[in-house]
Amino acid sequence: MIKLIDLTKTYKGLRAVDRINLEVKDGIIFGFLGPNGAGKTTTIKMMAGVLAPTEGRIIINGMDLASEPVAVKRCVGFIPDRPFVYEKLTGLEFLYFIAGLYSLDHAPSLREKISWLLELFELTHWQEELIGSYSHGMKQRLVMCAALLHQPRVLIVDEPMVGLDPKGARLVKDLFRDLASEGITIFMSTHSMEVAEEVCDEIAIIQAGKIIARGTGEGLRRQAGVDGSLEHIFLKLTEGKRIAHERPLSSN
Amino acid sequence: MKDLYLLIRPRLLGVRNRFIRSQGKRRKRALIMGGLGLAFCGGMFAVSCRVLTYFQSVEMMGDLLAKYLMSMIILTFFSLLIFSHIITALSNLYLSRDLELCHSLPVSVEELFVTRAVYTVMDSSWMLIIFGLPVFMAYGYVYRPGPGFYFTIIHMNLAMVIIAAGMGILVVMILVHAFPAQRTRDIVMLLTVFMVVALYVLFRLLRPERLVDPEAFFTVMQYLNALKAPQSPYLPTQWITETLWGSLTGTGERYLFEVALTWTTAAAMVVINIWVASAVYFQGFSKSQEAKKRRMGGGKVLDIFVSCIKKPFGIDLGAVIGKDIRTFFRDNTQWSQLMMLAALVVVYVYNFTVLPLDKSPIRIDFLQNILAFLNMGLAGFVIAAVSARFVFTAVSGEGEAYWVIRSSPLRLKRYLWGKYFSFLLPMLVLAEVLIIITNHFLDVSRFMMLLSSGTMFFMVFGIVALGIGFGAMYPNFAHQNIAQVASGFGGVLFMIVCSIFIGSVIVLEAGPVYVLFMSNVRGNPITVSQWIFIIMSFTAAFIINMVAIFMPMKMGLKVLSEYEG
């Protein structure tokens, strides 16, 4: 279970995340939606232990991230939005490096697990090559392999579909569903309404650092008073407007 | 022309915005760096004035020496400018991230090329201003020429920059036409390192110190021949030297032909570059965007090496150390710097083999001990310089993949101390090799040998901690080239603090060593107050060492824990 209590992040006077309170149950896929600059990535980075909160607490699996960072990180897998990795390592070496960071032993079971993940993400033929020669999508898939290597109980994902081809995106959606059915909690941010609608059990919408709505697709429809797609709900709640009506591009 | 201005504008606005919006820490850093730059310029000016005044006092040959010095300086600047343009042109013309956007804009290839060439000139030639201006101003100060000399400095240096830029950019365009830009970068980096190492070793082995000792030559002609810098009527540096010298000594009108030659060459370089660019620049850029070739990791020897080294560090730290070693040996820009290091050590040791100890009027054993003492400082400084390049950059070396470390269960404290211990052993070996070999050439006493190798042993603990600590206090994870990290604000600060640390330890040891040495020479016993002084000095040196080890590590850990990108 994930619990965010009064989570706040301030950058030089600007409140990027403003007293967020959330509770995410085990074994669900939780979608975190919001316009650009709303505070999604900041929240996710704080949950992954990459960024320190200004105020508030993050409780994961009953442990406080501030007081037990190592124990929390051991049960969390993090997939950032941009897959920056060590370009001079091969894919296989990178996975063994990650295994080392999580103190996983070089046992045959680890080798099997790595082979399975590489096979799953279609990277087996590239495993002996330097990551510098991978495409963006391949790096993204490698980072996903790395995040799943230590069998996390919670997966924190920032924009998982960016850079993936339709086949890769399908694979990730199915995988997330399978992981959730095994009791793993997935907290993911996304811009894609289609992905959120298709995969997420529950959704929260963040704007200007605050949660403005939360619930299932149906619950959000009720809150927004809109009977349409998630995109309509999102636009209504975040007060977005149809650009074409506001600014006629053809007038130039 | 309007498009050209529009393309250059983002760079100008960037500089302006950085200046206007810089506040607090950044402004302080800029002021400190500016102050250091000014101090350096002042130092260069003072040293140059001193040298030129000395030359003027040498009968018959004074002016000759000053002119040769000028020609050597101009030749060095010209070569450095070409190299510098080659390196910056590669990124400005082919590898910059904003190039994709620029090439998609409705502007001609020629205009885009000229804009990027201007960027390249701006990035590459500031060095000439910092290093060159004080030297040329010193010529003006010592020789007191008319105002025409200062005008000549400006326009001839401008012409030199244009010619060097033209040559450097042309080389890059041809190289990228033959190889992809990524490969070209590796080749250029390697070539640069080879050239620098070769030039450095060659220059040292020529023993330039003999030039200030004319007695070592049999005839004046031999001496003059030894002074000769490479000269040719076809070299632009020759035209520039003649013009500047003529202007300095009031015979400038004789060199109008050289002025015309220089400027027509500069103009020709611009035209040729634009021609070549219109033919090959876009193709080269397009090639640099193509996917990189599949490159295998491989390397059984490296695997064995890594598994041996990482064993004592445990699984998690071992993974980090193993990753660092693999990255280091697979990055051409990194491992090739080991050759620079080797050259540095060879030349350092060689210097001690040619020391004319027998010519000194001071007692040899006294001189040997003084030199051994100075040697500690110098060797410490060499270790600090090597640490600036390799140890200080250890944390920033994670690059944008730092999130991997931060989100992992590896504690930052353990991570930093792991990096510390991984560098400690190689730096200890390097320091001890330097100090023991050079002391051997100096033939110092057993006491001095023990003292200097012991002092150096303990100082390395502090220097490496300062390197890791300052590296963590001033991390730069968004760098394009790790070698540039060391020359940033943090790197400069590290060198300053390191020099103060080394200086303090040596000063604290100098007093007691003098007391011990003199009592040995005079055969007097050491008094109680002298013993107290000796013990207090060594204790103070020990305390400084401890502070140098733990304080930067603690501060680095704090800053890195709060790092927000």
Image (spheres, coloured by chain):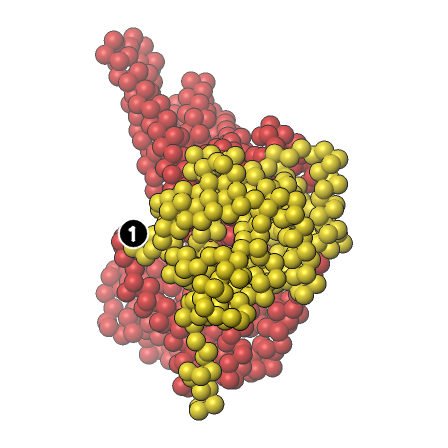
Q: Is residue A122 left or right of residue B66?
A: right
**Residue B366 image offset from top left, x and y in percent:** 36, 24
Q: Is residue B443 visible?
A: yes
**Residue B525 image offset from top left, x and y in percent:** 29, 8
Image quadrant containing the N terminus of chain B: bottom left
**Residue B174 image offset from top left, x and y in percent:** 61, 72
Q: Is residue B49 left or right of residue B368?
A: left
- The amino acid type of the residue labelled 1 equals Lys
Residue drawn at point x = 24 percent, y = 73 percent: B147
Q: Quadrant of residue B502?
A: top left
Residue drawn at point x = 29 percent, y = 52 percent: B25
**Residue carrying label 1:** B25
Q: Tell which of B20 and B119 is nearer to you.
A: B20
Chain ID of residue with mark 1: B
Residue drawn at point x = 32 percent, y = 36 percent: B500
Residue drawn at point x = 44 percent, y = 87 percent: A248
Q: Tell which of A75 and B198 is nearer to you.
A: A75
Mark 1 is surrounded, within 10 Å at the Cα level, by few (under 14), some (14 to 19) or many (20 or more) other residues, namely few
**Residue B282 image offset from top left, x and y in percent:** 59, 77
Q: Which chain is yellow?
A: A
Under tag 1, what secondary structure? Answer: helix
Q: Which chain is red?
A: B
Residue B269 lies, with reference to residue B374, above or below; the image says: below
Q: Tell which of A43 and B386 is nearer to you.
A: A43
Residue A147 lies, with reference to residue B241, above or below; the image says: above
Q: Is residue A84 left or right of residue B529?
A: right
